[in-house]
Amino acid sequence: MTTTARQSREWTGPALLSYGFRPFFLFAGIWAAFAMGVWIVLLTGRDPLPVAFTPTDWHVHAFVFGYLSAVIAGFLLTAVPNWTGRLPVVGWPLAGLLGLWLLGRLAVLIGGGWPAWVVAALDLGLSVALIAFLAREIFSGRNWRNLPVLGLMALFAVANGLFHMEAQQGPAQDGYGLRLGLAAVLMLIALIGGRIVPSFTRNWLAKRNASRLPVAFNRADGAVLALTGVALLAFVIAPYGAVTAILCLGGGLANLWRVARWQGWQTRSEPLVWVLHAAYVMLALGFVVVGASALDLMPQSGARHVWMAGAIGLMTLAVMTRASLGHAGLPLTASRPVAALYLALIGATAARLLAGLALGQVWLLHLSASLWILAFGGFALIYWPILTRPKRTAKPASRAQPA
């Protein structure tokens, strides 16, 4: 019987195509740094490329739908075979999926003079392929537990389509498409992050014989997820309403309570673990500041960046760094340079939030952008050899050692 591991080992081509996380995580990091560089140029008033949207819309889309689609693809193509026990996508089919993502990025980057439907179709190609892959795996493997993931992926694709439609009629940076896309991804973090953060923390603490372990998922977690979903729905429908503000503030406090039960403070000596907790805290704080912005207590843009750069950016960077090490057969521990990447991204989030509060302090925007480029450009550089070389296999035990 062919297993997931054997399927990957039997691929004799480039190691980059031996597992879904390898090409998509690498290109996600490269794109995140490159797109921020393009945004800095666009902010100066220069227009070196015929981007398909207005500069601000392009910036928002490049991160929420461009970067995230690559990370989600890498995660699902790696995790789903483990969930279902079915074979992974490797080799040239994997290269084809990467090609769909690259076509989408190219279309949005230089498709300013192209028909809008062509740009949208090319950009949505990967999402449609991923939904088909996920649906096939879930139904064939009868893995009904992950049907919500399929539903959220479908919402993410619909949100991208809405963004394209709204961008043709006017600014889409605060439209339904963006808000729906954000809501779908944030709900994925609450759902999947709520599984992996306490699970990885429990494993790490158990190896160290800790007396207190993360609380297992229970009805209280289900209630927090329900409140999170309702708050996000309100954000999509009426982002500036008083009811939305109350729900978001409640959702933020509820998620802070939830993450506090996972014993994150005990993991402060291992960045690869505490960064997961920090990212989930950013999710909770994002609800709080977005709720405050709905009450006109702070600017909406700076508040949303706590979600976009903090919760989404930090959680995806945390997952990419951890999953890449684990699947490459390397020790699950973060080096000092990798820990510095986490701190750079936290700094980028803080600087962007302060830039929204201290209007006119442009240097804060430049600081935030520079720290972002450092975080993701650094990830691409540090992880390039990990993602492009074959998996390290354990050396066989010597004969003098017991079996």
Image (spheres, grey):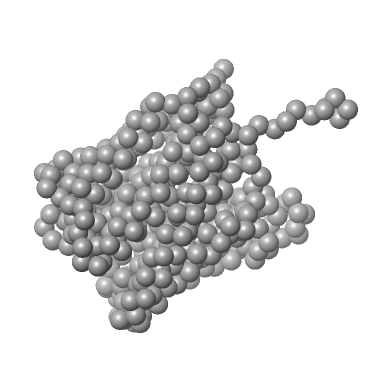
Residue 80 seen in the current view:
no
Question: Is 227 in front, or is 302?
Answer: 302
| Residue drawn where x is 55% and y is 41% of the image | 386
* Quarter of the image where one finds residue 94: top left
Query: Which residue appears farthest toward the top when viewing the image?
Result: 1
Q: Is residue 43 above or below residue 124?
A: below
Tell me residue 244's x, y (percent): 32, 70
Tell me residue 40's x, y (percent): 31, 64
* Quarter of the image where one finds residue 55: bottom left
Number of marks in picture:
0
| Residue drawn where x is 59% and y is 33% of the image | 391
Tell me residue 67's x, y (percent): 36, 50
Tell me residue 58's x, y (percent): 24, 56
Question: Is 35 in front, or is 187?
Answer: 35
Query: Which residue appears farthest toward the right when viewing the image?
Result: 400
Q: Is residue 295 above or below residue 155?
A: below
* Quarter of the image where one finds residue 365: bottom left
Q: The C terminus lies in which quarter of the figure?
A: top right
Residue 267 seen in the current view:
yes
| Residue drawn where x is 28% and y is 45% of the image | 105
Q: The N terminus lies in which quarter of the figure?
A: top right
Question: Is 10 in front, or is 147?
Answer: 10
| Residue drawn where x is 54% and y is 41% of the image | 385
